[in-house]
């Protein structure tokens, strides 16, 4: 749990340093949880943060299977349904493999 919180803190700091603005953190609904919701200009970005101590077993990227992506997408759709207008949005992933942080913009699509 602590490693996950530290990873989310690192991801939030990194994204803020890239000019993105935090909107929500650990947003939960019946579908699941979205780690970070940020604004990148006019785009709303749903961010999944994954951390692994190293690259064994495929590293952090391998820990986001199709079912997890589907839950994130459904959660994002529920989040968007509460908004008056629907901004452009995308799904990003921040991976922490040991000390290495990688940011994958537009990591997956809602329609696939």
Image (cartoon, grey):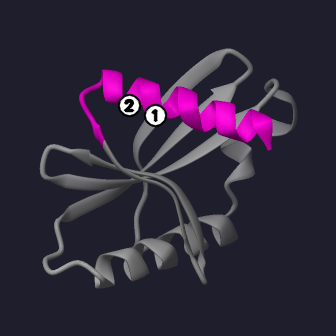
Disc 2 to disc 1, how far (Cα)? 5 Å
> Can you say whether 10 is above or below 26 in the image?
above
| Residue picked out by circle 2 | 15
Q: Is residue 99 left or right of residue 75?
A: right
> Who's the residue at 67% across and 54% down the image?
64
Q: Residue at x 80, y 44 (%)?
A: 1
Q: Residue at x 71, y 40 (%)?
A: 4
Q: Is residue 12 magenta?
A: yes
Q: Position of residue 58 (x, y in %)?
A: 78, 37
Left or right: 22 with respect to 74? left
Identity of the residue furthest to the right in this view: 56
Mark 2–mark 1 CB contact (< 8 Å): yes
Q: Magenta region: which residues?
A: 1-21
Q: In the rendering, at what x and y percent does residue 19 appear?
A: 24, 28
Residue 20 or residue 109, whichever sits in front: 20
Q: Is residue 15 magenta?
A: yes
Q: Which mark is residue 12?
A: 1
Judge by depth and name the residue closer to the eye, 84 or 76: 84
Q: Can the viewer see residue 27 in this picture?
A: yes
């Amino acid at each position: 749990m602590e490693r996950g919180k530290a990873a989310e803190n690192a991801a939030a700091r990194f994204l803020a340093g890239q000019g993105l603005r935090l909107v929500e953190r650990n947003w939960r609904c019946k579908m699941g949880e979205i780690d970070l919701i940020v604004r990148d200009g006019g785009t709303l970005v749903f961010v999944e943060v994954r951390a692994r101590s190293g690259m064994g077993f495929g590293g952090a990227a391998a820990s986001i299977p199709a079912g997890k992506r589907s839950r994130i997408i459904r959660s994002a759709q529920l989040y968007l349904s509460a908004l008056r207008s629907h901004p452009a949005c995308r799904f990003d992933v921040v991976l922490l493999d040991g000390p290495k942080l990688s940011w994958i913009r537009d990591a997956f699509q809602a329609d696939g």
